[in-house]
Amino acid sequence: MSEKLERYLEEVDKCLKPLPITERVDIVKEIKSYMLELQEQMQLNDVQIVEKLGTPKELAREYLGELVEKNTSFRFKNLLAVMAYYGLASATGLVVVPVLGSLSVGFMVSGVLAALAGTVKFAASLLHIDLPFIMFQFGSYTLPTAMAFPLSILVGAALFFGGRALWRVMINQVAAVKRKKETL
Amino acid sequence: MQIEEWKSQIKRGTLEYCILLLIYKKPYYGYEIIQEIANWPIIAAKESTVYPLLRRLLKDGYLTSYWEEAEEGLPPRKYYVITDEGKKYLEAMRGEWKNLTNVITKLEEA
């Protein structure tokens, strides 16, 4: 296998980073086998082969794309795959998806923390322990604990599901780009 | 042209079915599938579409695969075989396809 093609395979491997190592190895092995078939059966040269396959980034993107669309549940590994996929796609992808991605994660985490804080404060107040550093505040007005608790659950839930919705929006964005690309 | 966009939609919707129909008959490896579907432009697709699709079908359990060392000078080949799950899936698609073609025939008559 020529250096040009070996380098191509290395590039593809790099772009497939979010995937487990066994998958990456297998994917590269299959692409390499395909390249050799093209050489043997169709007598294509390196330039023709690379042209046929597209850039390593685009090729890797197609593999990652299948992984991303299938799974709309939130998993950190998927976040990386999504970012890698879109990062390879376009400049807007470098902005839109990381923003949506980090916002959705931020919202979900904040949502959980808010609900947790409210619960802790409420439980503490039941035991007559005062936790002055946890409070539900609008500007200078502090809510009494009894009211703050249900509100914190509400806000927490809103943030959490808002975050989840943003995550879905991002996944749909990725799917839309993939569809758009196919119609080009 | 709108027709080209429609054709690519058709292709995207049916490629999976076509590929499973092929693999149902016998095990295929990637290059072989790409060569075969190249015979029919309406479903012809690039390796960057076919390979990831095969991988997904594998992940879904509709296919299994094995690597085979080929003859002298030729590279090892990853063959895809349809599973029982895959056969069930294929039957379901076959039914829906029949559904679709019946409807279309009806609409074309009127």
Image (cartoon, helix red, strand yellow):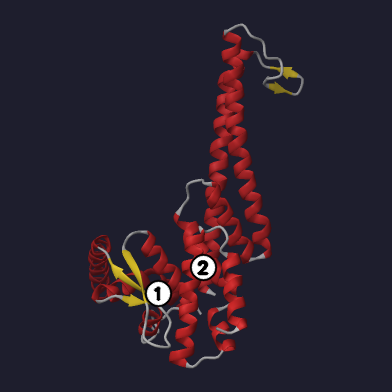
Counting labels gives 2
Q: Up-down: is B59 above or below A165?
A: below
Which mark, residue A162?
Answer: none
Q: Position of residue A116 (x, y in %)?
A: 58, 25
Query: What is the three-letter code of the residue carrying label 1?
Result: Lys
Write down the residue under mark 2: A62
Label 1, secondary structure: give it.
Answer: helix
Residue A41 drawn at (x, y percent): 43, 91
Density class for disc 1 (Cα within 10 Å; few <14, some 14-19, many ≥20) is some
Q: Which three-letter amino acid code belongs to the residue tagged 2?
A: Glu
- The answer to whether one can see residue B2 in this image is no
The residue at the far bottom in this view is A43
| Residue at image mark 1 | B11
Q: Is residue A107 left or right of residue B27?
A: right
**Does mark 1 fall on the same chain as mark 2?**
no
Q: Is residue B109 above or below residue A172?
A: below
